[in-house]
Image: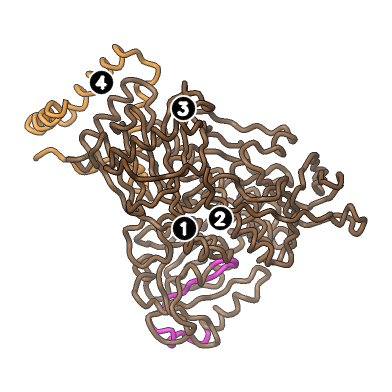
């Protein structure tokens, strides 16, 4: 499996009528996760989030691909 | 400053109440002759209800203000007889481009499907829209347009609404069975009634400049995040009629509005933008400048007794997405047929509660979408800005990130899926024309020539019934379809077919390009019940007059 970079957000059981809505749902939840946090707290939240999601993905070749893209754009 | 537009001055006339001619009782009074109030009054009048329209001024909107009118608003304006002028004068567009620094990272097409009558959006200065609507209203004999008429008192005793109106000739009183409130974001009537509007103000300021110039930029919406000519802020460019260009600069909360509005401060900003586009020598003149802040908020309910709140009086959103005037026009589309049935004694007043329910649902969708756009465009924290810039950085190469770029989710109608007026599906359908959906447009042919489905529908309940050959409809079915018109709330049957003519004088729409069949997932005998505001009320795979009547009762709160 290789890294999926197509739009892939959804909510199980929810019907969307506009293509932008699932991504916007995710993005709002992401920003909301950081509400009222200090810069240090936000950095820690991001680190924890990456670790949790990385474990969920599991496939280290996919993770390496993502890590490379992320680092190249920094 | 230059002016490409001559503001009309509408004639105030002494009202009959002050001349002692009439007792001043009307079925409906509308307050506010902006786009929303005018649309409400015109809709009521064409459906046969006499209406008084009060406005405290005697001209149209000063400045271009709301400039983007979306496909759904144009479809409603078609029903009101005003869209053609708007589209002729306005600038039609479908494509929006988003830039990060100098590079395009994302573009969208509002109407990627072929075979729709109206474009995704037009840009037209609000004063033109209001002028066309006033002209249309003046052509209708049952609209009493009263300029320079300021409502200074309002009371609802449960039976009727008493108004006190101030004019150049003094004050007078009049009564209405129903009051449609379209008096804008500051809504004096909302204040007089002591009604709350809940939400938040956004801590940012934006400068709007209308600039007259001859430029050959395409008719597209261009949006910049953090461009070199206006660092750390956003800029939006739109083309309007008469070579007027709308430029919108984000300023930040601490900008001084009075300073920013001065031409000596505005002109360098525009010059910097033109220079960045390689047009530093281009001549332009300022037409209108304004600095605005905005709020995202709505009233808890849009119906209060005999007062029906519409447009900005009921709800306000950020301008990103053009969801203000467009949603207000949709409010009146939803309201007027319901008000007409209640006035005619054909539906209970609870039908008007569904106006509030459905439009609160739509307002919440507009608030969510415009708030998300605002949060993306003007991030409120360092981490939020980091995520925003990461999305923009990934967008050029990765499709998932393009879908997250939010420079405004432009106005589209709500799918009223939660409405109690819908009859839930019992049969299986593909596609999006679910109960509560706004009808998708499609071309069709009638004996009168080429037409659009949305021109053939509206203003009454209708039943779309599909058969491949309209001539094959059995006499009993034809009689049952025709008989739907004889009910207290009549339903007009429209036969959709690939060929043939329906018996018994039933109207036939030939699905000339197969789009109706495709968009509505039609099979032989598929039936859709459509509301007067062109939303799906119910649908079935067979035609059963009993089920249609039950769905009609449900859609009118008569069940």
Residue closest to the eye, B150 or B339: B150
Horizontal side of B432 relative to B255 (left or right) equals left
Horizontal side of B180 relative to B251 (left or right) equals right
Tell me the CA gap for discs 1 and 3. 29 Å
Q: Is residue B377 magenta?
A: no
Residue drawn 36% across and 43% down? Answer: A21
Horizontal side of B485 relative to B425 (left or right) equals right
Residue at mark 2: chain: B
| Residue occupied by mark 4 | A46
Tell me the CA gap for discs 1 and 4. 47 Å
Q: Are marks 1 and 2 in contact (CB under 8 Å)?
A: yes
Residue closest to the eye, B236 or B505: B236
Tell me the CA gap for discs 3 and 4. 27 Å
Instruction: Tell me whether marks 1 and 2 sit on the same chain.
Output: yes
SS for callout 3: loop
Residue B276 x %, y %: 28, 38
Residue closest to the eye, B53 or B487: B53
Q: Residues within 10 Å of mark 2 (few under 14, many from 20)?
A: many
Relative vertical location of residue B541 with respect to residue B119 in this rendering, above or below:
below
| Residue occupied by mark 3 | B204
Residue at mark 1: chain: B
The brown chain is B
Quarter of the image with the C terminus of chain B is bottom right
Horizontal side of B169 relative to B468 (left or right) equals right
**Residue B90 got which mark?**
1
Residue drawn 82% across and 46% down? Answer: B168
Tell me the CA gap for discs 2 and 4. 50 Å
Instruction: Tell me whether marks 1 and 3 sit on the same chain.
Output: yes
The orange chain is A
């Amino acid at each position: 499996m290789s890294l999926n970079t197509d739009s892939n957000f959804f909510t199980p059981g929810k019907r969307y009528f506009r293509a932008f809505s699932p991504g916007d749902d995710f993005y709002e939840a992401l920003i909301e996760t950081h509400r009222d946090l200090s810069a240090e707290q936000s950095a820690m939240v991001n680190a924890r989030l990456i670790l949790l999601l990385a474990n969920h993905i599991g496939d280290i070749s996919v993770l390496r691909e993502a890590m490379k893209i992320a680092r190249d754009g920094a | 400053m230059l002016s490409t537009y001559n503001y009309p001055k509408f004639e105030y006339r002494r009202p009959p109440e002050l001349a002692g001619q009439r007792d001043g009782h009307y079925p409906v009074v509308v307050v506010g002759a902006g786009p929303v109030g005018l649309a409400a009054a015109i809709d009521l009048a064409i459906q046969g209800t006499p209406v008084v329209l009060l406005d405290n001024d005697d001209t149209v909107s000063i400045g271009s203000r709301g400039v983007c009118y979306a496909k759904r608003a144009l479809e409603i304006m078609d029903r009101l007889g005003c869209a053609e002028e708007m589209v002729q004068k306005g600038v039609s567009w479908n494509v929006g481009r988003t830039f990060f620094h100098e590079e395009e990272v994302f573009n969208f097409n509002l109407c990627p499907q072929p075979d729709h009558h109206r474009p995704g959006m037009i840009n037209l200065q609000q004063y033109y829209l209001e002028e066309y609507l006033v002209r249309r209203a003046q052509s209708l004999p049952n609209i009493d347009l009263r300029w320079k008429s300021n409502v200074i008192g309002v009371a609802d005793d449960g039976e009727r609404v008493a108004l006190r109106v101030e004019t150049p000739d003094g004050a007078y009183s009049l009564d209405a069975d129903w009051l449609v409130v379209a008096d804008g974001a500051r809504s004096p009537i909302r204040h007089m009634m002591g009604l709350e509007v809940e939400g938040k103000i956004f801590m940012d300021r934006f400068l709007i400049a209308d600039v007259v110039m001859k430029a050959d930029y395409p008719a597209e919406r261009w949006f910049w995040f953090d461009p070199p000519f206006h660092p750390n802020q956003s800029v939006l460019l739109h083309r309007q009629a008469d070579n007027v260009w709308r430029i919108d600069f984000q300023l930040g909360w601490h900008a001084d509005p009075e300073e920013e509005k001065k031409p000596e401060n505005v002109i360098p900003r525009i010059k910097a933008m033109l220079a960045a586009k390689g047009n530093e020598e281009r001549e332009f003149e300022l037409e209108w400048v304004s600095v605005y802040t905005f709020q995202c908020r709505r009233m808890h309910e849009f119906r209060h007794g005999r007062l029906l709140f519409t447009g900005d009086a009921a709800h306000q959103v950020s301008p990103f997405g053009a969801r203000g005037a467009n949603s207000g026009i949709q409010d009146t589309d939803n309201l007027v047929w319901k008000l007409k049935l209640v006035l005619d004694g054909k539906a209970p007043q609870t039908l008007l509660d569904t106006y509030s329910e459905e439009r609160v649902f739509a307002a919440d969708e507009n608030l969510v979408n415009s708030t998300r756009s605002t949060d993306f465009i003007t991030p409120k924290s360092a981490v939020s800005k980091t995520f925003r810039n990461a999305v923009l950085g990934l967008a050029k190469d990765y499709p998932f990130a393009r879908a997250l770029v939010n420079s405004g989710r432009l106005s589209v109608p709500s799918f009223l899926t939660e409405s109690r007026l819908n009859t839930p599906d019992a049969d299986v359908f593909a596609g999006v024309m679910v109960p509560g959906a706004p009808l998708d447009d499609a071309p069709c042919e009638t004996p009168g020539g080429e037409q659009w489905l949305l021109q053939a529908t509206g203003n009454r309940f209708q039943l779309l019934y599909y058969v491949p050959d309209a001539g094959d409809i059995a006499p009993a079915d034809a009689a049952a379809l025709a008989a739907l018109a004889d009910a207290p709330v009549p339903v007009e049957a429209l036969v959709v077919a690939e060929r043939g003519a329906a018996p018994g004088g039933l109207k036939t729409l030939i699905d000339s390009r197969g789009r109706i069949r495709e968009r509505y997932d039609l099979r032989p005998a598929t039936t859709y019940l459509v509301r007067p505001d062109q939303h799906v009320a119910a649908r079935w795979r067979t035609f059963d007059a009993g089920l249609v009547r039950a769905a009609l009762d449900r859609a009118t709160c008569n069940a």
